[in-house]
Image (tube, grey):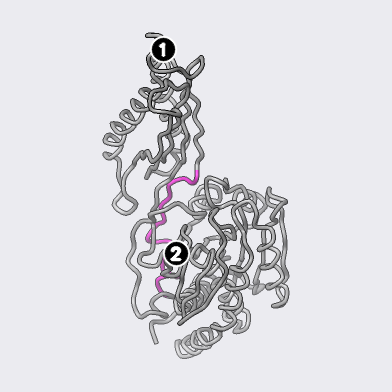
Amino acid sequence: MDSASDGERLEELRIAVNRERLVETAKALISVPSPTRSAGAVADRLAEILADDGFEVKRPEADWPEAPAVVVRLETGRRGRTLQFDGHLDTVHLPFVPPSLEDGILCGSGASDMKGGIAAAVEALRALRETEALAGGGVLLTAHDHHEGPWGDRRQVRALVAEGFVGDAVMLPEYLADRLPLAGRGMAIFEVSIRREGDPVHEVLRAPETPDVPGVGAELVCRLRSLNKTLAKTSDPWSGRDAVFVGFIESGEIYNQAPVGCTVRGTRRWVTPGRTDAVEAGFRALVDELAVESGTSATVDFQIQGDAFRVSHEDAIVSAFQSAYSAVTGRELPVGGKPFVDDGNSYAAFAGIPALTHGPDAKGAHTLSEAVAVDELVRVARVYAMTAVAYCGGVVQGPE
């Protein structure tokens, strides 16, 4: 294929991304409420849309029969890589906001995080099929429940990987558009429950030897604060530093009661891949030591949300993405770190494949005011389609 025909094919692919069809898909997904662990109805809706488009849709349970995943493949039948587009259909547990479109801005629950992004990936898949732009390989589209923590535990991603629904690289259209993240921290959500024996009692009637449960909780916060200073020594130029954060502490029912329990919640983050077990063990040891010293009992709920990851500058998916991004925008995207944990962390850990998070410049994620410009969704669809062309076997030229 010569460069002229490459350019013509990419122009055809750019035009094939249908703005109105993309918006209708996004609105259809947003219109179905889908808090985490309850995404079955929206998964059914996505499956219907794809089936109506003529795609062969598979519905693996993926360890969550309440909301079987949605899987579609676009195959060329020729040798090449498989690029996976993956998205979560569940939303955080906030009151439902129906879709609306005004002045080119799409709003509603999941518009930002991440039904708008999924609709863009679906539109990229349609454009690739209509133009037959893939020279080889294929594209795998997966969508699922169980992303948002602490309600979900990413079980469907693990199951999809175990069942072979995984590509050679994966792209995730989360709301990150200002950088290409080649590194990201792992993260766990912790809850520590500290308790003493006996009943709540008025402070003046408390026996001298009674453990000061709120004081133990406060001491735990102080020790975690000290740990955080030590953790700062471990850092990554893109993803940041190791850290522990406390955002919640609760104890007692009234100001002059000696309570029996105290709860401390927060997050633990780390930059080095493969350290989930060591991080959890170290956290539990710190809590256990304090419990022994204070004469209390302590239980730890330590929910791993994702491991740290790194993607090589030299990986083929990185060059394919940058070529596609340049073709659409006229420039490369700066590289950096991913500020949050998403399913890309899980694909890196469980499938060992490079995972790139790139989506629309959207606003209001995890709020009642999610909003995304339709122009951004169109841009993402074009970038995804052209990345697939470059990665799976084609060539992407420079900007128009």
Task: Tell me the residue that label 2 is attached to.
Answer: 175
Say which of 226 and 220 sits in front.
220
- Distance between mark 2 and mark 1 Cα atoms: 55 Å
Identify the secondary structure beneath mark 2: loop
Residue at x 48% of width, y 61% of height = 368
* Of marks 2 and 1, the one in the foreground: 1
Residue 314 on image: x %, y %: 39, 61
User: Which residue in the structure is indicated by mark 1?
Assistant: 205
Q: Is residue 365 left or right of residue 43?
A: left
Q: Quadrant of the C terminus?
A: bottom left
Say if residue 395 shows up in the picture: no
Left or right of 146 in this view: 228: left
Earlier along the polypeptide chain: callout 2 or callout 1?
2
Q: Relative to 281, is 81 above or below?
A: below
- Secondary element at image label 1: helix
Instruction: Give coordinates of residue 182: x percent, y percent.
Output: 39, 57
Q: Quadrant of residue 269?
A: top left
Q: Which mark is residue 384?
A: none
Image-quadrant location for residue 210 = top left
Count every numbered label the image shows and give the total: 2
The crowding category of the residue bearing disc 1, from other C-alpha atoms within 10 Å (few below 14, some 14 to 19, many at least 20), is few
Kind of residue indicated by mark 1 = Leu
Residues at marks 2 and 1 touching, judged by CB atoms closer than 8 Å: no
Image coordinates of residue 344 in percent, x first then y, are: 50, 55
203 with respect to 101 (left or right): left
Instruction: Please check the rendered image and state whether residue 317 is part of the magenta-colored stretch, yes or no.
Output: yes
Which is more toward the observer, 381 or 98? 98
- Queried whether the magenta region covers residue 298, the answer comes back as no
Q: Is residue 361 visible?
A: yes
Question: What residue span does the magenta drawing correspond to?
Answer: 305-323
| Residue at the image position 42 percent from the left and 18 percent from the top | 202
